[in-house]
Amino acid sequence: MAKVTAGVATSHVPAIGAAIDLGKTQEDYWKPLFEGYEYVKEWVKETKPDVIFLLYNDHATAFDMDFIPTFALGCAEEFKPADEGWGPRPVPTVKGHPELAAHIAQNVIQDGFDLTFINKMDVDHGLTVPLSLVFGQPEEWPCLIIPFAVNVVLYPPPSGQRCYDLGKSLRKAIDSFPEDLNVHIWGTGGMSHQLQGPRAGLINREFDNEFLDRLVDDADELAKKPHIDYVREAGSEGIELVMWLIMRGALDAEVELKHRFYHVPASNTAVGHLVLENKIPQ
Amino acid sequence: MSKRLAQPYDDVPGTIIFDADMARKGYHLNQFAMSLMKAPNRERFKADERAYLDEWPMSEEQKQAVLDRDYNRMMALGGNIYFLAKIFSTDGLSFQFAAATMTGMTQPEYAQMMLDGGRSPEGNLYKKEGE
């Protein structure tokens, strides 16, 4: 059977992708950030996921203002890196797992979460920057990846509680798929940032660090945090953090914290990163 | 004109939340910006901005805000930052540059603020605190 074994949370700032693509990771500005990802690079080699279920948001790339799905499941065989206006990032095409995606749709929709099916979609930095941070610059991504796009651009996004509950439903669905697969679930975006208006540049270390603490061991309560708290305290784009709750919902109630990292700034944004494992029964 | 109800985020200072009301108002502005994802459109826009804008059913105010590269104005008229990013990308400018213009700071000043840990939440959470 398939099994969700671990979760990764990370910010997905586009400038990080540019730093990787342009070979700037050892520059003074970027070095401390990339050092924070050394652990996960080794960890992922040891834990070898077969499939990553990757939660991210599209940034006006695949979805324009005509259709904005709240929860969109990538069901295709493959997903090409998007041209976001200056040419696609030089990263491999993402290979999906359509059978597992179909199984997830079958189960999660009947469990009460009305997902949108996506059969063709280019994926933007929201998805490819986390892959680059964890896997570096390989010829091919070393595993299959199911993209799952969450609307956090057009307000209101789904609530934290809805995201957390969706995570639980995803977990049940994935763990009932009849193929031996080691599945990791990644939540991306955040942490505090505001890209717009006179308040642009807001960073809230206290909010971010409390969120990191509580995501690990107080997630049931953290899920109840209302939107306004994210918007007010973590910035208009800090609302992306609700995606981390989907990841957390898909893990065990108790998890082992393998790695934690926090850094300010990456361009306009506070970067947070967690590696969590389910406690494997002996 | 608007029958919009008050929202809890109305008193967050220096911030426009892109909700369904704003999305309706800014639909054509955002779709225009989205069109700049395609290289031939970028070239036509750069060759004659006014003529390209006139192809879109946007308000005159929206068109002027684009011509002025007044991002705060564009957002007040329904623009969303991820869509508007296509405009400053077409200009070859970074997110940090655009963010700096929205705050009234120069880019070096803004970049230094970020290096120093970003804009503090202190005094920046409620309109009544910082106006």
Image (tube, rainbow, N blue to C red):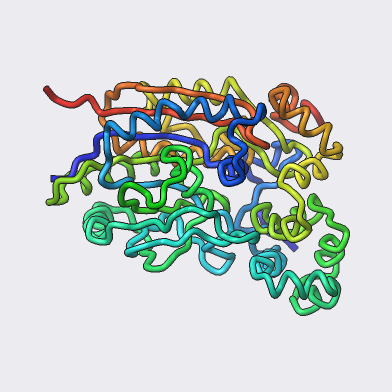
User: Quick check: A74 left or right of B117?
Assistant: left
Between A206 and B2, the one nearer to me in the picture: A206
User: Quick check: B119 left or right of A73?
Assistant: right
Residue A185's spot in the image, x, y percent? Answer: 33, 41
- Image quadrant in which you'd find residue B49: bottom right
User: Which residue is drawn at the image coordinates 31% and 48% (left, top)?
Assistant: A143
- Image quadrant in which you'd find residue A40: top left
- Image quadrant in which you'd find residue A198: top right
**Can residue A234 be seen here?**
no
Residue A134's spot in the image, x, y percent? Answer: 43, 37
Depicted A113 relative to depicted A17: above or below: below
User: Which residue is drawn at the image coordinates 42% and 28% (left, top)?
Assistant: A274
Depicted A15 relative to depicted A32: above or below: below
Quadrant holding the C terminus of chain A:
top left
User: Quick check: B55 left or right of A6?
Assistant: right
Between A6 and A240, the one nearer to me in the picture: A6
Residue A12's spot in the image, x, y percent? Answer: 53, 41
Between A157 and A62, the one nearer to me in the picture: A62
Residue A107's spot in the image, x, y percent? Answer: 22, 55
Give the total of numbered labels: 0
